[in-house]
Amino acid sequence: MGLDRHSALNVVDFATLTVGATAVGLDSASPAYSAGKVSGLTVRRMYITTETDAIRWRPDGTAPTSSVGHVLAVNDSISFTGADYSNLLANIKFIRVTNNATLSITFFD
C-alpha cells in the first residue's frame, strides 16, 4: 500500500521499532508513541515499512503470535493514512515471525 497522495499529511516524527519474540506496541518505538503523541505532537496516522524480517500484527490490542495475525513481509509496507487511526495506533501490536525485525515508522498528524 502506498501513501495517500490525495490528502495533505504533516510529518510528526520518524521512529524505529525492534520487533522480537514478545509482542510490542508503538510505545516501544524510538521515539515512543504515548497517549496519542510522539515527541509531544499529536499523531493520528502512520506509514510502516519492514526492514529486516517478516512480522505479524493485530490492530485490536490482542498480542499476535508468530503464526496468528496479519503478515507483513520484509520490505513490505502498510499505510494508515486515509483517516484518523488514533484508536488503532493505541492498540496495534507486532511480533516477529522468525528473526527479530526492524520497522521504520513515519507518524503523521
Image (cartoon, rainbow, N blue to C red):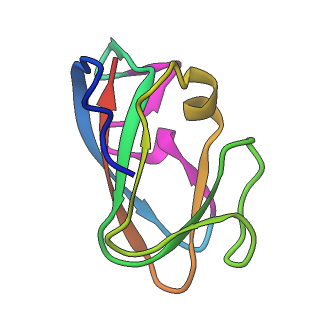
Q: Is residue 25 magenta?
A: yes
Q: Nearer the viewer, residue 21 or 78?
A: 78
Instruction: Please tell me in which quadrant of the rendered image residue 75 appears.
Output: bottom left
Looking at the figure, which quarter contains the C terminus?
Answer: top left
Residue at 73% from the left image edge and 56% from the top image edge: 63
Instruction: Please tell me in which quadrant of the rendered image residue 101 appears.
Output: bottom left
Is 26 placed above or below 104 here?
above
Q: Nearer the viewer, residue 22 or 61?
A: 61
Residue at 47% from the left image edge and 84% from the top image edge: 99
Q: Is residue 39 left or right of residue 87?
A: left
Q: Is residue 67 left or right of residue 96?
A: right
Instruction: Please tell me in which quadrant of the rendered image residue 3 appears.
Output: top left
Is 15 placed above or below 73 here?
above
Q: Is residue 103 magenta?
A: no
> Which residues, given as a range, are shown in magenta?
23-37
Give residue 54's position: percent from left, percent from top. Answer: 47, 76
Is 37 placed above or below 76 here?
above
Q: Nearer the viewer, residue 85 or 103?
A: 85
Give residue 48's position: percent from left, percent from top. Answer: 37, 50
Residue at 39% from the left image edge and 46% from the top image edge: 29
Q: In this view, which residue lies farthest toward the bottom?
A: 98
Residue at 22% from the left image edge and 18% from the top image edge: 10
